[in-house]
Amino acid sequence: MLLKYLITQGGNNFTLKKEFRKKVVALVLFGGFFLPIGFLILKSFFYGTDSLNYILENLLFEYSINTLKLILITCIFSIIFGVFPAWYVSNYKFFGRSIIDLLLLLPLAVPTYIMAFSYSEILSFTGPFKITVDLIQPEILGILLSFSLFPYIYSASRISFSLLGERYQEISKNLGINKTKYFFTVVIPLSKPALFSGLFLVIMEVLNEYGAVKYFGVNTYTIGIFRAWNSMNDTGAAIQLSSILLFIVSFLFFLEKSFNKNKRFSSAKNSSVNKLMKTKILKKILIYIFCLTPIIFAFIIPVVFNLVNLIDDFQSIEFLNLFRLTINSISVSLFTSIFVVLISILFLYGERQSKSRLYYYINEFISLGYSIPGAVVALSIIIFFTSIDSNLAKISILGGFLVYLFMLIYAYIIRFMAVGKTTLKAGFDKLPNSYDNTAKVLGLSDFNFFKKVLFPLNKLPLLSALILVFIDIMKELPITLILRPFNFDTLATQTFEFAVDEMIPKSAIYSLSIILICSLLLVLFKKLLDRLHVSGD
Amino acid sequence: MIYKNFLNFILCTVLLSCNVEKNDEINIYSQRHYQVDKKQYENFEKKTGIKINVIKAGADELLERLYNEGENSPADLFVTVDAGKLQKGVEKGLFQKIKNKIIESNIIADLKDVNSYWVPVTYRARLIVYSNERVLSHELSTYEDLANPKWKGKILVRSSSNAYNQALMASMYANIGEEATKKWSKGIVNNLARDPKGNDRDQVKAIASGQGDLAIVNSYYIGMLLSSEKESEVLAGKSISVFFPNQAKEDRGTHVNISGFALTKNAPNRENAIKLLEYLTDVEAQNTYVNNSFEYPVNPKVKPSKIVSSWGEFKFDKLDLNLLGSLRADAIKIFDYTGWK
């Protein structure tokens, strides 16, 4: 039906035909990526609702409150660790500023499970401080999660702050507004879109978290999903609960979009960049406290802890295994991140070229794949592919190494499209539409326009997107565990296995390898970012 | 161009991966991811030349994968650390019966599956550990007694999301009935020293640090703590003692659970899989389990490790272990009803 409609719509003239072709491509692509999840949502209507009702009646309230509380704590601390340092680094001159600027990004290299496992050991009675107080508390979990997640807010606000330019500051000065008031009444409202995009990622990650919340005994909504699936043996209820979560998140997401539709702040119009201010010693101390606290707790302590463990356990390292796992991790991350970036390009380029809102909504909706727990994404892929398999008269496509590798990569793409797209979009949006028009006048085809204009001008955002997706896949756990082919281990799965067996020292070499590889990439990412947005001292 | 390449990639991937017949291998879906398993499989490979391929993930996720793959599944064996999960697989119709004299003669009768769908390779006890300083062993008796108000503010245990606790609750349900189990669970919650959290080792550490006096933990974790390379962990392990509950003559014994294998319904390498199970239940492999993972052997000819033997012998609950699975949902409801987080 839809196709028929599109065909009748598309037949009239050349431009319409082109527009129609693009719509079809968009729908096919969207279908390809949304189908497994759409299939899952559809299926959820056909499952029984006993367990769902049980959970909704007895547990939902408590689980929702716990989830909201955890989100709130994590967000508050992520903002404290992210926004203030970003403001100081963007505006003040102080010793070590550029290295601090880099170090504030590096906690992104530490996966939440390594953060949680390391701290649970550090804060325990058998840790270095012999702590006798019970520190496995929900509030502590919130802070630990913010250690891993605040760089999302830091990097978003850092870009936004440095693009604000001097003009606002001068005007505010002339109006007699002091610095604090300027920060809260001018800077923060203008940076709201950037802050929201950072917070969105933080919230999605908290919603997704399973291992750490289970360990801390905090019953969140995700625990509810797994309770239905693992404990009540009701896969249907788990799928239903995931669908409900997806709808709630979508609703909130679009609500935020429509609220802030007219409040988007365009940086291009205000291009003069901040001059860095000198400051007094007292303020400098404050700056160092704000900037160094997150660096020490979110990066240095977990790294040193794992290094000490590594040294203690050095003789038992299997270097051959380490090498094999590193190759696995790097190749699957690299391969997938290239795919994610290519597909993100198709979507974003489609949105840019097409006048229809269809692309816009598709693009926004795809980002929400990020809110579904990884294990559920993996489940949807299995269910989807296997139902294709049995319906296709038992063509035995299952079981092969490559098929599962393909499914694994497919799931990663659904999950991490949001990360790739957000990074790329920032770059694409900076190019004025006049480029497109000029290209059209010059008779460049869509593909040539992309090849000759968009690609060369967006090399840096492309590389940045590649790096960020790569890091996320390198750290990913639930999807990898479920969908991997036989004998396919990665650094993340090995770290997890040792940690779950309560053998933290043995996991150190694998944790550190993840942290090292991701850190090196983040250093590169930072260099790209500086060339893209922020002019330094 | 890009679309074309993408389609080509998909096609190639599908074509390339169409099953090529392979012999002399076994495919295992494993919830167990201990180092000892790797050792066992390597030994078996050396002995027989049969290659073992493994995928390790959560039990429920693997069951789901198996269920959806249906008869196209490459898996021969599914292994997990909870009889409840094996029962879940049986209920979903994923397994076939294993009838083999060698395997049967290798295993203690009371641990065998009454329906022959799964084969245990080790077992573990969910026991009580207590502070050497603050509790005397004669004050302890049964799981039921842990609900006694005399233990108020003293008990440590992990959360109800944990499969071992769910199995314990299911065993209580099977043994003493719904109402008494509810009362018991409520009593435990009232006696907790802190909210349920952490893993089994954390409960022992919490006793060592004085946050509570008693904990419900699995036996092998104590073995691992005592044999740790970290001195502080050994000290924590030494600050507690082990107690096997419900040992009175007329009583049922301590709750145990197994690590067990099931043969998948369409196992492509059935013969090889059976060979592996024969090997794993035999004396040599049983000794490897016992000395590396501190679990109890299912083969009566093999003795537990030195550390584990030092706790003495005990009587275990002879309950049909399938009930740990079929009563799981009821157990969960009791956790929720009584506020065991």
Image (spheres, rainbow, N blue to C red):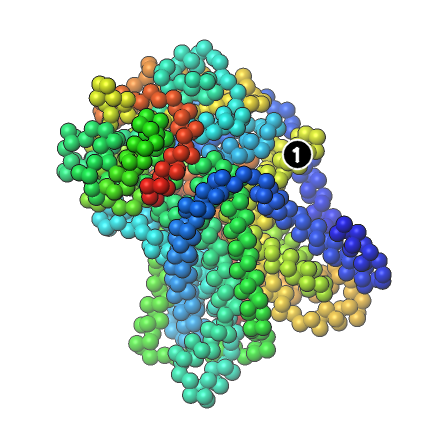
Image position, residue A57 (x, y; %)? 44, 46
Q: Is residue B337 left or right of residue A257?
A: left
Residue type, label 1:
Asp
Q: Residue at x 61, y 63 (%)?
A: A425
Image quadrant containing the C terminus of chain B: top left
* Residue furthest to the front: B179
Q: Residue at x 45, y 64 (%)?
A: A154
Q: Is residue B140 above or below residue A54?
A: above
Image position, residue A318 (x, y; %)? 42, 37
Image position, residue B187 (x, y; %)? 26, 38
- Asked where in the image residue B119 lies, by quadrant, the reply is top left
Q: Residue at x 67, y 72 (%)?
A: A432
- Total labels: the figure holds 1
Residue B222 visible from this viewpoint: yes
Q: Nearer the viewer, residue A176 or B25?
A: A176
Where disc 1 sits, the SS reads: helix
Residue B306 visible from this viewpoint: no
Check disc 1 and report the residue beneath it: A389
Q: Is residue A16 left or right of residue B251?
A: right
- Asked where in the image residue B240 lies, by quadrant, the reply is top left
